[in-house]
Image: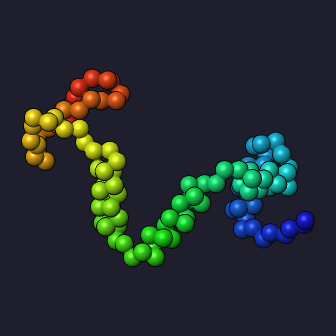
Amino acid sequence: MTLTINLAPEMERKLQARASANGQAVAEFVVQTLEEKLGGQPTADELLAPFRRQVEQSGLTDEELDAFFEEVREEVWPRPRRPDATYTSNQPRTVLSERSHGWRSL
């Protein structure tokens, strides 16, 4: 397939510079770049696009979506609680740190 693309002068300069830096002709660099882009792993944006469309179509606000994820996170990964203590949001909690395997206050 032969493809003709009109590039802005600045884009053309960048393309030539990148190809040269890789020791490739411009056409070779473009083919390699396309192969990497089209044959590689999908980007985070590509993976999240269906979810983002669903959220947009749902009409949820950012605040409602944040609250939903916080609720789900609490169900899946509740904060550790000592059975003999009552906490308020202003009191520090002691938890086992995964990183240090020791106790620390939050």
Farthest-out residue, front: 83
| Residue 92 place in picture, x, y as percent | 14, 38
- Which of 45 and 29 lies nearest the eye of the viewer? 45
| Residue 62 place in picture, x, y as percent | 35, 67
Where, quadrant-wise, is the N terminus in this rendering?
bottom right
Residue 15 visible to an observer of this rendering: no
- Which of 18 and 80 lies nearest the eye of the viewer? 80
| Residue 44 place in picture, x, y as percent | 56, 55
In this rendering, position of residue 34 left or right of residue 75:
right
Where, quadrant-wise, is the C terminus in this rendering?
top left
Q: Quadrant of residue 11?
A: bottom right
In this rendering, position of residue 16 left or right of residue 75:
right
Residue 10 visible to an observer of this rendering: yes
| Residue 48 place in picture, x, y as percent | 53, 60
Q: Quadrant of residue 9?
A: bottom right
In this rendering, position of residue 93 left or right of residue 69:
left
Residue at image coords 71%, 54%: 37
